Image (cartoon, rainbow, N blue to C red):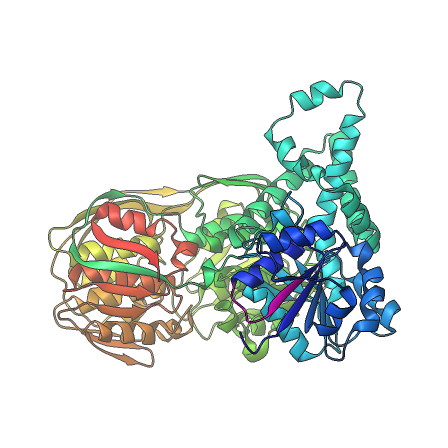
């Protein structure tokens, strides 16, 4: 800290200025913290309370001695203070401020100095309190909160770095953005809500019977209108200082309010429901990713770990969450249907929720999810609307690939993007055949996301021979085929999951399946239906393998989807000698389901038939664990697709199993695994949920604890995994490193 600055002058010892001064003093920086306030009593109080090191007896002298000056004055007073200190500034003195608007501060500096000094770095701490004055100074006021600095194009890098460092000393998270962008963002997130609260309370207070209105006001009214108790003078100044951005936000709000008023007047239930459900979903979405609009939340950056203790048992009866593939498709096809589709058993994981939010963004009214129940108010094949911006799909490869086919046929432009993991996954496998159909689609660097899709392109039907088996590519082209002129057909080299074909038929759309070729013709329509999503066989797999490798186990998994294109894991486990039986087989909404009972039996190594690989492609991480616990050698071939999933699943499983003492070697399209003893150790899931869960069940046969790093994404696909694992007898806990 000795390389920072020697002397800091804080002009204005209110709550913000005083708290900043106190925080800098308590962080034991080498700088002397000097305070100035036009009220000498405030300076004396600050000195007595230890907020500042020294009082500024003369402003001119202190300005000439300071290395860094903080203007902690109302935005309206900024220009006058700059005029006052200008004659006494020395070359290189760093200036910053704390105002909640930045454009007017920069304009004030231009008027005073001609051009903004390159050492003037505007700033804005997004923190505060209902208290005021130096006596309320709180050294923790900024700790864990955001501070925005808005350096200009010509700003001095060293001055910017020192202002940045000053705020970091207080414990704040420092962000940087342009002046205009700052004022737009704050107009929307802070200034507009204050205007609404002031206006609402003022309007209601003018009512003749206002006493009853306020007497019987509920908690929601009190929560919303709390900010109407803010300092009127300060907000008068803010409105004038940030006039244009605030007016733009008020115009947007009044336009939306007018739409809602019209819907109420005309009894337009769908319009009202759409507004309310989108708002509720958006509020919940942002609550998940931000603990507070100002406070930092670094949880997603932490290394979530699982600690699985050796041994344990596997017994009981459970139902795992709904099938993710079917959950995705229920939202997509329900949105394109005519009428209201009722869904039960919907998987409320982040991936399926990304699909749900995408269709909300395109104007579809969707109620829920609430305990797996969703109501979708379909808009028909041609009823989607342009989203307000890029569609963010998180980590969901299914969402981005299937939507690319659907959106290629829409009249509006769209952009699809995702998180860091999704940004590494190949997208040309869908983009190339879509271009053959006439779509204009642009991928990012290396053929990866984001995808930019131009609307208004007429699609023509094609026949496509898939070079690699992929249900996502097949489904993508089928969705595009709903709009293409003629009959679109796809031939796959090996069977893949057929949920799209089955569900289209469930919605009354004609689909032709002839051996390995599936065809759809444009011109049909989808009719709303009811969908009961079966339990996901991919999620069930971890428990199937857990029971298969654990002596004394006896486990029943209820209502599991046993679609013929998904039962590879069942077939492979049976070939390995698993004691597995299907009970209560039935069909629900076009999908076959059953209860699966599995008991321990010593597994044997096998050569996995290649025709089973596409039917179990997502289940191989868990099957690698089964093979490591089997007698003899297991050989997997034809599974090169595993290398382009959320991680290179072949290499990650090979590395992890070797760390646990397994005899395994990877091959370009699979692995050779020789069963034996497993010991404890540390492995890395590389953000891949299936890897994390697979190594968790490996502890059932290990001699020591297995620590699994980077498990955060389990929460996106199987939020209740740890709880269910503990319920059936695994000794596993979750925590952060």
26 part of magenta stretch = no
- Which residues are drawn in magenta? 27-34
Residue that appears at 19% across and 73% down: 662
Q: Percent x, y for residue 323?
A: 40, 51
Lateral position of residue 644 relative to residue 510, left or right: left
Residue 344 on image: x %, y %: 45, 40
Q: Residue at x 61, y 47 (%)?
A: 136
Total marks placed: 0
Image: 578 above or below 150: above
| 29 within the magenta span | yes
Q: Position of residue 229 (x, y in %)?
A: 70, 37
x and y percent of residue 401 in the render? 53, 64
Where, quadrant-wise, is the C terminus in this rendering?
A: bottom left
Q: Is residue 615 visible?
A: no
Residue 148 appears anywhere in the view? yes
Where residue 316 sits, quadrant-wise, is top left
Q: Nearer the viewer, residue 489 or 409?
A: 409
Left or right of 482, for residue 95: right
Q: Main secondary structure of the magenta part?
A: loop
Nearest to the observer: residue 39 or residue 412: 39
132 relative to 302 in the view: left or right: right
């Amino acid at each position: 800290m000795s390389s920072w600055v020697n002397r800091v002058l804080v002009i204005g010892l209110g709550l913000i200025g005083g708290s900043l001064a106190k925080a800098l003093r308590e962080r034991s920086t080498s700088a002397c913290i000097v305070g100035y306030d036009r009220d000498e009593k405030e300076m004396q109080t600050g000195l007595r309370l230890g907020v500042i090191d020294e009082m500024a007896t003369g402003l001119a002298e202190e300005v000439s001695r300071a290395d860094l000056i903080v203007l902690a004055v109302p935005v309206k007073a900024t220009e006058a203070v700059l005029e006052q200190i200008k004659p006494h500034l020395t070359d290189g003195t760093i200036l910053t401020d704390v105002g909640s608007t930045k454009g007017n501060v920069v304009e004030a500096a231009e008027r005073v100095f001609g051009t903004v000094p390159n050492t003037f770095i505007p700033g804005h701490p997004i923190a505060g309190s209902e208290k005021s004055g130096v006596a309320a100074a709180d050294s923790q006021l900024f700790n864990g909160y955001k501070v925005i600095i808005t350096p200009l194009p010509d700003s001095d890098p060293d001055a910017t770095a020192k202002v940045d460092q000053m705020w970091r000393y207080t414990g704040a998270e420092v962000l940087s953005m342009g002046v205009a962008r700052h004022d737009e963002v704050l107009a929307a997130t802070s200034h507009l809500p204050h205007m609404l609260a002031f206006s609402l309370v003022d309007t209601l207070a003018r009512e003749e019977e206002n006493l009853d209105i306020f007497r019987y006001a509920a908690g929601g009214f009190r929560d919303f209108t709390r900010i109407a108790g803010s300092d009127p003078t300060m907000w008068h100044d803010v409105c004038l200082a940030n006039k244009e951005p605030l007016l733009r936000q008020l115009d947007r709000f009044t336009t939306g309010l007018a739409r809602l008023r019209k819907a109420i007047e005309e009894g337009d239930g769908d319009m009202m429901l759409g507004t309310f459900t989108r708002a509720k979903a958006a509020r919940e979405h942002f609550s998940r990713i931000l603990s507070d609009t100002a406070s930092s939340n670094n949880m997603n950056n932490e290394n979530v770990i699982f600690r699985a203790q050796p041994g344990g048992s596997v017994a009981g009866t459970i139902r795992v969450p709904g099938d993710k593939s079917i959950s995705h498709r229920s939202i997509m096809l329900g949105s394109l249907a005519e009428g209201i589709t009722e869904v039960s058993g919907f998987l409320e994981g982040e991936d399926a929720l990304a699909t749900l939010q995408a269709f909300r963004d395109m104007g579809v009214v969707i109620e829920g999810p609430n305990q797996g129940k969703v109501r979708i108010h379909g808009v028909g094949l041609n009823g989607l609307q342009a989203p307000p911006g890029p569609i963010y799909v998180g980590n969901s490869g299914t969402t981005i690939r299937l939507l690319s086919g659907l959106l290629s046929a829409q009249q509006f432009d769209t952009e699809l993007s995702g998180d860091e993991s999704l940004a590494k996954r190949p997208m040309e496998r869908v983009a190339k055949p879509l271009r053959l159909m006439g779509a204009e689609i642009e991928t990012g660097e290396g053929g990866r996301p984001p995808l930019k899709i131009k609307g208004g392109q007429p699609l023509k039907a094609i026949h496509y021979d898939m070079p690699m088996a992929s249900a996502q590519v097949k489904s993508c082209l089928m969705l595009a085929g709903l709009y293409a002129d003629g009959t679109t057909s796809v031939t796959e080299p090996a069977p893949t999951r057929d949920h799209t074909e089955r569900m289209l038929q469930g919605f009354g759309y004609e689909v032709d399946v002839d051996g390995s070729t599936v065809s759809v013709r444009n011109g049909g329509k989808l009719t709303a239906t009811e969908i009961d999503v079966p339990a996901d066989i991919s999620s069930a797999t971890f428990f199937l393998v857990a029971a298969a490798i654990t002596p004394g186990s006896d486990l029943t998994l209820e209502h599991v989807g046993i679609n013929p294109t998904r039962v590879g894991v069942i077939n492979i486990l049976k070939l390995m000698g698993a004691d597995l039986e299907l009970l209560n087989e039935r069909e629900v909404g076009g999908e076959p389901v059953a209860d699966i009972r599995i008991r321990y039996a010593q597994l044997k190594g096998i050569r996995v038939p290649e025709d089973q690989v596409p039917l179990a492609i997502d289940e191989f991480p868990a099957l690698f664990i089964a093979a490591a616990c089997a007698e003899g050698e297991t050989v997997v071939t034809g599974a090169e697709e595993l290398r382009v999933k959320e991680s290179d699943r072949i290499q990650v499983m090979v590395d992890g199993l070797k760390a646990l003492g397994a005899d395994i070697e990877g091959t370009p399209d699979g692995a050779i695994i020789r069963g034996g003893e497993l010991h404890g150790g540390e492995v890395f899931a590389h953000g891949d949920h299936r890897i994390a869960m697979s190594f968790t069940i490996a502890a059932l046969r290990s001699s020591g604890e297995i620590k699994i790093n980077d498990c955060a994404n389990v929460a996106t696909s199987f939020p209740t995994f740890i709880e269910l694992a503990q319920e059936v007898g695994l000794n596993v806990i979750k925590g952060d490193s």
